[in-house]
Image: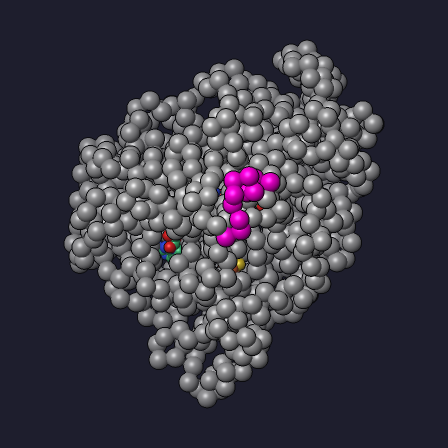
Amino acid sequence: MDKLSSSIPKVSRRAFLKGTTAGLATVASGVSLPFNVMASDKVKSAVENGEEKVIWSACTVNCGSRCPLRMHVKDGRITYVESDNTGTDTYNVDHQIRACLRGRSMRRRVYNPDRLKYPMKRVGKRGEGKFERISWDEALDLIAQSLKKNIAQYGNESIYLNYGTGTLGGTMTKSWPPSATMLARFMNCIGGYLNHYGDYSTAQIAVGLDYTYGGGWALGNGLADVENTKLIVLFGNNPAETRMSGGGLTYTIEQARERSHAKMIVIDPRYTDTGAGREDEWIPIRPGTDAALCSAIAYVLITENMVDQPFLDKYCVGYDEKTLPPSAPQNGHYKAHILGQGEDGIAKTPEWAEKITGIPAARIIKLAHEIGQTKPAYISQGWGPQRRSNGELISRAIAMLPILTGNVGISGGNTGARESAYSVPFIRMPTLSNPVKASIPMFMWTDAIFRAHEMTATTDGIRGVEKLTSPIKFIWNYASNCLINQHADINRTHDILQDENQCEMIVTIDNHMTSTAKYSDILLPDCTASEQMDFALDAFVANMNYVIFADQVIKPSFECRNIYEIMTALSERFDVKDKFTEGRTQEEWLRHIYQQSREQLPELPSFEAFRQQGIFKKVDPKGFYIAYKDFRDDPEKHPLATPSGKIEIYSERLAEIAKTWQLKQDEVIHPLPVHADSFEHFGDPLMQKYPLQLSGFHYKARTHSTYGNVDVLKAANPQEVWINPVDATPRGIKNGDLMRIYNDRGEVHIHAKVTPRVIPGVVALSEGAWYAPDEKGIDHSGCVNVLTTQRPSPLAKGNPQHSNLVQVEKL
Ligand SMILES: Nc1nc2c(c(=O)[nH]1)N[C@H]1C(S)=C(S)[C@@H](COP(=O)(O)OP(=O)(O)OC[C@H]3O[C@@H](n4cnc5c(=O)[nH]c(N)nc54)[C@H](O)[C@@H]3O)O[C@H]1N2
Ligand SMILES: Nc1nc2c(c(=O)[nH]1)N[C@H]1C(S)=C(S)[C@@H](COP(=O)(O)OP(=O)(O)OC[C@H]3O[C@@H](n4cnc5c(=O)[nH]c(N)nc54)[C@H](O)[C@@H]3O)O[C@H]1N2
Ligand code: SF4
Ligand SMILES: [Mo]
């Protein structure tokens, strides 16, 4: 398939960026005036007349970017939202951090009709959404009672902190990882909690690439280093939607490309916004088959002598005979596997890969030549390719391309991982330590409710202990929609949660009546970021990072309380208030950690000056970040954190796991980064019943589900399922038609976007739409998790939420 340059008008990069901003003004106001004329003049005069105050706040959601918001307040209400007004257009110097449309619509989230106003107690069944208003005292007493009862009966291991990233960018309000939260600080005062490891974002790649590069998390070059490259190859990486703001990375990559003029190739089942006329080529790929593509590229590189043999000999284990560990079988090395001299006897030729990936053999050969002959090359993967049932293998297979070509550890190169970000050494809230040692994969909590007794290290990836001793009885759900909306297979979760004798108590602390809230027993209304003081940090950026003073803009709405107040009040009921607060209020804590931060970062201004200036930016004094440069320069002195100290193409640890773990027939754990089929995968026998692959993606309309109830954003970015005309036409489906998408797990009704922007055989539906079931359980919002599976991936026990088989028809 060709790229779609004919159907998508080319616009200059600058015009494109401006266009988005103007679009906001049009949608938000209904008036077609350019953004800068309409809003700022009105705002400017109001501020000058002294009617309005402007207070710095921030958008702290988990989109990877992190944006300052300057809130205009009049008579105690937010009237208008602007973004950063400091800095310039030059990236990596002190560029403006411009919020995207979502952050700019924050006012509509604060004043949303879905706001939780008072503490509430469930009166109907879980999921029915029937609640009764109660007082704060009553709510906290009920929670304390349940905690005491369950801890006495089952131990602290029965209290679970669920995954939730709604306010990931906060400091006091930080909602993930569990150990960084105020919930953890409180629970650690009363004996601890059941922890989780991994995340829905990167479960498979985090584990997979750890076997290749070691150290727990594989690093990548900073994205500004694209300035120094000649070729960019992005596997399932879509920064235009997933790193959106001026602080995020889509701006960096475009700016860096303007300097390097590097060619950019995007490999994705969808023609994404990162392409959108700015790429040089789009190569559509069948989902879940990147490892086959990479194997065939390796075949061409090897047979045409384009591999960097000295690099492979010096820095890697298991490329060929020379560096194969003695424990490995004969011909167990990568080269033999690719050339067809290994166990399976299959040569991984471009023709072999064409049948699997859907990419013509000639195009694979051309891509191999481009990668083999252009140095340095920046080869990177987003996290779409790995959020799959064989994602661990895929993440390692993609990394083979920079390894084979010696692009690791050099300027303009990369490791095959996603980019690393520069961060400022800012102090976090201390949360004390957790006496409970058990930790479950974050994806396995539903199982830990009803079959904890059989969950062990080798069956379900339990860590810290050999096996679980207690089921989950109590769930804390803070800034999380991962109980329902964002966790897979909603109907399975529904069934598990119906039995109130199993998980006895679910407490949700949120701003809105989400689907997760509807399944909870107690609802606590939290303050939004606008209603309290905090610092916002941890943005994914290139060479410049920043901290935002997110001040209190308005008084808490209704009866809302912030997380620190809630946990303080609860700590009184356990006589641990002094330990929890150490005698400080929220503001006193912030001043305290700010003081500590100033010792590490002497350039930080005084607290009051920071409050006025709103944002503190710092450029990486070391310049471009190059991952594993030390190792490349001197591998003896700076070995990697793998057992061999080298890049492990063949992993002895994985060979051991493959022998000892209990796996199902269709699950593969392999010492080499091979292509292997897995469940709900192309070629699965289940395709006879469900012939289409349903692939998910992260959408600009929302950050997961957050902002999903903002009317103007919904109008601007409708929820629709992408389907190629090749699949739509025989089914009589036209653009805009209402469609049924279904499999054995559930059914979704949603409108079709008939478009050549998705590869045939695949339908694509973005994650995060607000689950809206009817009485039969059919979803009418396009919530993809009605269709996804809770079966975990083999090695990481992670969420394979992009691997699904479905059938579709016109309604
Ligand atoms: N099918 C499918 N499912 C997926 C994914 C996928 O690709 N496909 N992606 C997964 C990934 S990578 C992730 S990270 C997860 C994200 O899943 P979640 O972490 O659950 O993210 P959100 O859906 O944004 O939900 C966060 C919740 O926080 C609330 N919130 C926002 N601000 C505040 C606040 O200030 N205080 C409080 N108390 N609450 C607040 C929001 O109202 C929302 O209910 O989803 C995962 N689910
Ligand atoms: N606007 C917005 N930004 C976000 C988020 C959001 O919800 N909204 N979520 C944030 C979070 S928490 C995370 S974890 C990141 C997620 O970042 P990613 O996981 O990278 O995002 P995805 O959209 O899931 O996947 C990226 C691309 O991979 C493609 N893809 C899917 N399967 C395959 C495959 O098998 N092979 C190839 N080559 N490509 C494939 C998808 O079509 C998509 O275009 O985004 C962050 N940024
Ligand atoms: S959603 Fe992300 S990119 Fe948009 S304003 Fe918020 S932090 Fe910035
Ligand atoms: Mo994520």
Q: Is residue 779 left or right of residue 158?
A: right
Residue name at image x 45 percent, y 64 percent: 712
Residue 282 lies, in percent from the top left, at 69, 45
Provide the residue span drawn in magenta: 726-736
Quadrant where the N terminus sits is: top right
Toward the viewer: 287 or 592? 287
Q: Quadrant of residue 308?
A: top right
Rendered position, 712 above or below 792: below
Q: Quadrant of residue 472?
A: top left
Q: Which corner quadrant of the figure contains ligand 2?
A: top right
Residue name at image x 52 percent, y 40 percent: 731
Can see residue 228? no
Residue 762 lies, in percent from the top left, at 56, 38
Residue name at image x 68 percent, y 65 percent: 14
Quadrant where the C terminus sits is: top left
Rendered position, 565 above or below 684: below
